[in-house]
Amino acid sequence: MELTDNTLSTILAISSGFLFALSIQLQNLGLQNSDPRTGALISIASTTTVYWAFAPFVLESSYWLSWGTLCFIIVGLFRPALSVNLAMGSIKYMGPTLTSAIAATNPIFGVFFCGIAPWRGSFSSGCTWNRSCCYWYNNWEYKDREFN
């Protein structure tokens, strides 16, 4: 059996959703015996260790000298501590189901900030409301159109 791009992307999306649900349930179990700060520390440390272990095998050396790397470093200084602490607190006080439901609104904020961002987006001619809305709706109508 040969996997097409659509089949592979569907399998990856379902696997990602399953692993996300599994991780949030395991975090909930861990938070029954710990506080959110300790959970955030363990989460950040384990994620960092795994990323650094696999980075030499999956990243090209030219990536380290790009502007994107600097952006990720800057964001990486404050985002993990803030968002992981908030996520762990949310799981502890609201539970994994409600936390997951609220976290599912993440793409809405991504589209919103892409549309108002003053800098250039990842698209070749910048990120606009039209493009971000098209991305939001999986490019159903616009995937073969040229954006101006």
Image: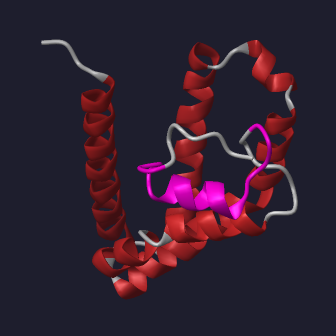
Task: Tell me the quarter of the picture where residue 13 sits.
Answer: top left
- Residue 51 point in image, percent of width and height: 58, 33
Which residue is drawn at the image coordinates 56% and 62% (left, top)? 133
Q: Residue at x 64, y 16 (%)?
A: 56
x%, y% of residue 79? 70, 61
Asked whether residue 145 is in view, the answer is yes
Instruction: Residue at 35%, 65% (x, y): give it.
Output: 30
Q: Residue 47 at what x, y percent from top left?
A: 54, 44
Quadrant assignment, res 65: top right
Quadrant, the N terminus? top left
Q: Nearer the viewer, residue 92 or 22?
A: 22
Verify whether residue 133 appears in magenta.
yes
The foreground one among 82 and 10 is 10
Region of the chain picked out in magenta, as a range:
124-141
Query: Where on the picture, by quarter, is residue 91?
Result: bottom left
| In-image side of 66 versus 50 (left or right) | right
In the image, is 144 to the left or to the right of 66?
Answer: left
Query: Residue at coordinates 41% horizontally, 87% vertically from top-left?
Result: 93
